[in-house]
């Protein structure tokens, strides 16, 4: 049984059906005029063979071609892309089945942050009243390590609302190199969570080793195909409208191997895309469709996700502003476009602008998480723990997000309005009206322990102090202390024998090893 | 045998089951004898009324209170248990005098003049009854003359006054002044409560205690009784 996610009833839409069609046609226009710049020779050849008009860009020494992609080629790609994509998991009960026309939302961590935010609580004494002490959170930012990634995966394994794990920490240990980074980040993640693991590739060099490792864990080549425990994110189209050489090559190779891949585009409204909603949505839609068209030319039927990461620029520093309401507007429009094509959608919410957990972070992410989730994307990424424009992962924030998502998931439950339930409610009202106290409290009891009533916010303070972060921190420590279901010893031994480059300290079965760090 | 019935009464008070129709905590006990039926059965078996009250009802409410304090139980659970105890006390009432059991105390409760809100007052009344107090509930929008009259007649140990609104809470001051004028103020403890109130307001109008909720009211009363 796959994970259930949240099936959204009557998804929220910003655009009318007519506007969706308008965006589609405008995107088609863009793909032929001005077309897409392509810095990857093989992709240019594939497009040319597929019917696109391809011409070298004059004056480009490094190899750049202008692709004019006809609508028919794009629509063939959309037709050929699977409408249902499965992302498997080490524990198959954690698999995700995503149908492009079904607004069933799965919540996922992400993306690759450079920094890890550690939180500690120090005791401060009030100057004017030395008898009064307060626990105050102090934050330390440091570069992420493979140990942090293991810890993040262990935490995410325990968060109830989190359905899959995107490696959220860029591992920057001294012994992690470009050549061994991919096997280490995937192994560290897979060894600490039984949920699906997704990441981007650093280089193509270790792709086959990576696939081999996944096959060993899944039980074989065919088993990996049936239960793809890993998947990939590729940002092959740089905004505006440019196929990048290396990531496009990565996409081609991933599609050849038939592994699930996100065609991800991340235009920034105001700098690399129009800031107005219509403009950025038309452009990102064209960019994603160009990527999907390429994937299907390489390998018809290759499983892909429509990957939308549009964001508005801040006007004070031109950084990404995921907290801006416009970023959510852009994302919701993209979700509608993906549903129009019936291709499962990888969408973005929850990243917030501040550097640390707190009021601003909660406000910004609650808005974007709620509204984006209401529109029913299949795979909602960036939702857990990301702060500071996607630069920082805070495990404490991930725990807070889990509580936010408990509330949003509860809110999105469908209304209970059957004939039988209405009759029961009428009977209850009549019964209570006949009592002297006219209270319904007695009737609550049967619901109290049935899961039909939302629980109170789990980090509520009793007095005037705000102890949310301290209470969430206690919860985080409790979650991290739980046992981890690691890859078994025999499989681990095979992986270390057959896959080069994995750091010996990640072998928990080595002498003195513990918890994958 | 009598131990079995007392244990069953205790368990059913904890389950908040007044009658056999009640479903209990997990919703799966409808049809089984509950506090009312078990209390009748206990009387038929000539089990001592004091034993029923002390070991069955009061002992159970102690457990329920502990579970509420530890957040295992919620207010609806407490109220259901209190209602179950009230139901048992209604059945036991004719036998109380004979067995020498006195109520824990007499309590008159009312929402003051001009105020129609009674959720809090009703909850306090249920809790007090469930804890063994004899409660006279005068309802809502009760003028001070009526309260004074009832205090004079029934001579309660406590008067509880409730108000939700800042515009009506001054009615509590009127009640206390009227009790003073009638020479009754020293004969009762006056407890006040309601969303608009505060400890300071209670002090200002000369109330004996401010109670944040029904549970605090129980604690306050216990303190007064202990100190009496």
Image (tube, helix red, strand yellow):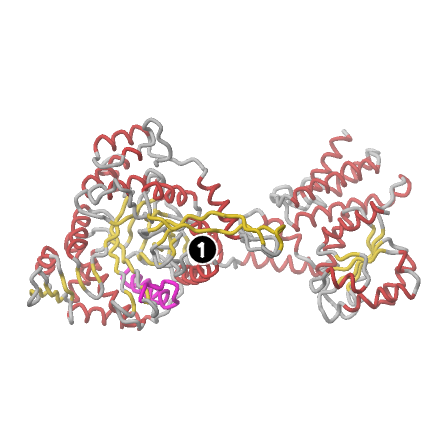
Q: Say which residue appears at 31% left-offset and 61% top-offset.
A: A339
Q: Which quadrant would the N terminus of chain A be assigned to in this image?
A: top left
Q: Say which residue appears at 23% left-offset and 71% top-offset.
A: A25
Q: Is residue B54 left or right of residue A288?
A: right
Asked whether residue A43 is drawn in magenta, I would say no
Q: How many numbered marks are there?
A: 1
* Res A453 seen here: no
Above or below: residue A358 compared with residue A165:
below
Q: Is residue A329 left or right of residue B37?
A: left
Asked whether residue A324 is drawn in magenta, I would say yes
* Res B153 seen here: yes
Where residue A99 appears, x then y in whole percent? 32, 54
- Between A363 and A135, the residue placed more toward the observer is A135
Q: Is residue A156 left or right of residue B110?
A: left
Above or below: residue A166 compared with residue B181:
above
Chain ID, mark 1:
A
Residue indicated by mark 1: A357
SS of the residue at dot 1? loop
Q: Which quadrant would the C terminus of chain A be assigned to in this image?
A: top left
Q: Quadrant of residue B147?
A: bottom right
Q: Which residues are magenta?
A: A318-342
């Amino acid at each position: 049984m796959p994970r259930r996610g949240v099936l959204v009833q009557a998804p929220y839409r910003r655009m009318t059906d007519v506007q969706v069609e308008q965006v589609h046609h405008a995107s088609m226009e863009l793909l032929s005029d001005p077309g897409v710049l392509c810095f990857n020779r093989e992709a240019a050849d594939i497009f040319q063979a597929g019917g696109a008009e391809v011409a070298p860009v004059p004056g480009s020494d490094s190899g750049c071609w202008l692709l004019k992609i006809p609508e028919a080629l794009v629509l063939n790609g959309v037709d050929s892309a699977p409408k249902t994509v499965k992302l498997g998991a080490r524990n198959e009960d954690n698999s995700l089945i995503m149908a492009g026309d079904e607004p069933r939302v799965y919540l996922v961590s992400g993306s690759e942050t450079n920094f890890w935010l550690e939180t500690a609580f120090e005791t401060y004494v009030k100057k004017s009243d030395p008898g009064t002490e307060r626990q105050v959170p102090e934050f330390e930012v440091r570069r992420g390590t493979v140990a942090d990634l293991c810890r993040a995966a262990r935490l995410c394994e325990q968060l109830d609302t989190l359905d899959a794990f995107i490696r959220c920490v860029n591992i920057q240990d001294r012994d992690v190199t470009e050549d061994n980074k991919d096997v280490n980040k995937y192994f560290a993640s897979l060894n600490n969570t039984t949920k699906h693991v997704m990441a981007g590739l650093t280089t193509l060099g270790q792709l086959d080793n990576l696939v081999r490792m996944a096959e060993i864990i899944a039980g074989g080549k065919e088993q990996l195909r049936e239960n793809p425990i890993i998947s990939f994110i590729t940002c092959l189209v740089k905004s505006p409208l440019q196929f990048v050489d290396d990531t496009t090559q990565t996409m081609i190779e991933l599609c050849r191997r038939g592994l699930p891949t996100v065609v991800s585009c991340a235009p920034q409204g105001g700098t690399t895309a129009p800031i107005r909603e219509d403009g950025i949505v038309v452009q990102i839609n064209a960019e994603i469709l160009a990527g999907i068209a390429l994937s299907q030319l390489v390998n018809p039927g290759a499983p892909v996700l429509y990957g939308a990461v549009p964001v508005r620029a801040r006007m004070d520093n031109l950084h990404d502003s995921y907290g801006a309401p416009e970023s959510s507007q852009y994302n919701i429009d993209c979700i509608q476009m993906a549903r129009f094509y019936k291709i499962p959608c990888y969408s973005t919410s929850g990243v917030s602008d501040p550097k640390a957990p707190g009021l601003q972070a909660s406000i910004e992410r609650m808005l974007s998480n709620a509204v984006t989730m209401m529109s029913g994307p299949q795979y909602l990424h960036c939702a857990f723990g990301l702060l500071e424009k996607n630069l920082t992962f805070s495990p404490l924030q991930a725990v807070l997000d889990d509580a936010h998502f408990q509330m949003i998931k509860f809110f999105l439950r469908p209304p209970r309005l059957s004939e039988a339930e209405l009759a029961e409610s009428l009977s209850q009202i009549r019964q209570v009206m006949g009592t002297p106290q006219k209270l319904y409290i007695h009737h609550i009891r049967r619901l109290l322990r049935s899961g039909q009533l939302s629980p109170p916010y789990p980090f509520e303070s009793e007095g005037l102090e705000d102890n949310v972060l301290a209470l969430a921190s206690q919860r985080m420590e409790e979650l991290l202390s739980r046992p981890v279901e690691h890859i078994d010893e025999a499989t681990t031994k095979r992986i270390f024998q057959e896959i080069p480059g994995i750091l010996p300290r990640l072998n928990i079965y080595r002498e003195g090893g513990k918890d994958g760090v | 045998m009598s131990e079995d019935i007392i244990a069953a009464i205790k368990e059913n008070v904890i389950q908040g089951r007044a009658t056999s129709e009640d479903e209990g905590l997990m919703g799966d006990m409808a049809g089984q004898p509950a506090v009312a039926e078990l209390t009748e059965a206990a009387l038929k078996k000539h089990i001592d009324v004091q034993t029923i009250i002390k070991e069955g009802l009061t002992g159970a409410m102690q457990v329920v209170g502990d579970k509420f304090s530890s957040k295992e139980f919620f207010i609806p659970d407490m109220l259901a248990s209190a209602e179950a105890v009230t139901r048992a006390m209604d059945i036991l009432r004719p036998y109380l005098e004979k067995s020498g059991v006195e109520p824990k105390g007499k309590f008159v409760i009312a929402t003051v003049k001009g105020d129609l809100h009674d959720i809090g007052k009703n909850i306090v009344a249920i809790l007090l009854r469930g804890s063994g107090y004899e409660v006279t509930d005068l309802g809502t929008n009760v003028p001070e003359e009526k309260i004074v009259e009832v205090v004079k007649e029934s001579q309660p140990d406590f008067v509880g006054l409730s108000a939700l609104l800042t515009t009506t809470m001054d009615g509590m001051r009127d009640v206390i002044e009227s009790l003073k004028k009638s020479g009754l103020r020293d004969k009762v403890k006056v407890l006040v409560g309601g969303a608009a109130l505060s400890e300071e307001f209670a002090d200002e109008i000369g109330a004996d205690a401010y109670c944040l909720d029904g549970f605090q009211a129980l604690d306050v009363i216990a303190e007064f009784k202990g100190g009496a």
